[in-house]
Amino acid sequence: MNGEGAVQRIVFVMVNARSFQPSDLDAEARHDAQGARVFATAEQRLATVAAESVFLSVELDAIADRDCRRKMQGIPTSWTLTGAQVDATLAMGEALFLDNPALAGLAAATGAAAGGPAAGAVDRVCAGLPEHW
């Protein structure tokens, strides 16, 4: 908010860590996943609310490595996750945020100093995952 209490920018970060049974439908990484399409629609409607709206999607569909993506998407959505599954989910969420191609635009729109994307963060998390849960 500016000194007068008016909203200057709205930043939306959508985190989608849904799990599902692997299939051939997830054979390739997608940065234009379903959430991004929802954001595009919302962004059009919110454009009248704020001078600038920034949408950043963080989702497992963006993991380029097919085996890693399937492993992460195979973590169940439940209250009985192991410590390793919780740690992997948190680490991957942070890595996907840092590697997100839209992060530079978010920094520019908010006036934040950005040290550049943490290229390879997702790859580092993938390399540290166990073979099986």
Image (tube, helix red, strand yellow):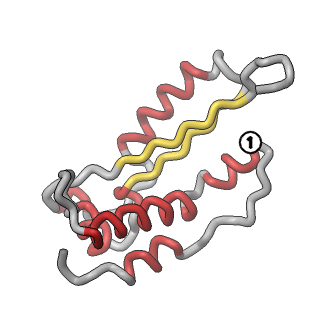
Image quadrant where residue 23 sits? bottom left
42 over 66 or under it: above or below: above
17 over 6 or under it: above or below: below
The x, y position of residue 66, in whole percent, is 30, 71
The x, y position of residue 72, in whole percent, is 28, 65
SS at mark 1?
Answer: helix
Assign the C terminus to one quadrant of the image: bottom left
Q: Amino acid at mark 1?
A: Thr
Image quadrant where residue 26 sits? bottom left
Residue at image location 74% in from the left, 42% down from the top? 110
Residue at image location 43% in from the left, 36% down from the top? 37
Left or right position of 86 against 104: left
Foreground pick, 84 / 16: 84
Residue carrying label 1: 110
Left or right position of 71 against 46: left
The x, y position of residue 46, in whole percent, is 58, 21
Residue at image location 43% in from the left, 48% down from the top? 32
Number of numbered markers: 1
Residue at image location 59% in from the left, 73% down from the top? 119
Give the class, few, some or many, for how many residues have Cα within 10 Å of label 1's Cα (few <14, many ≥20): some
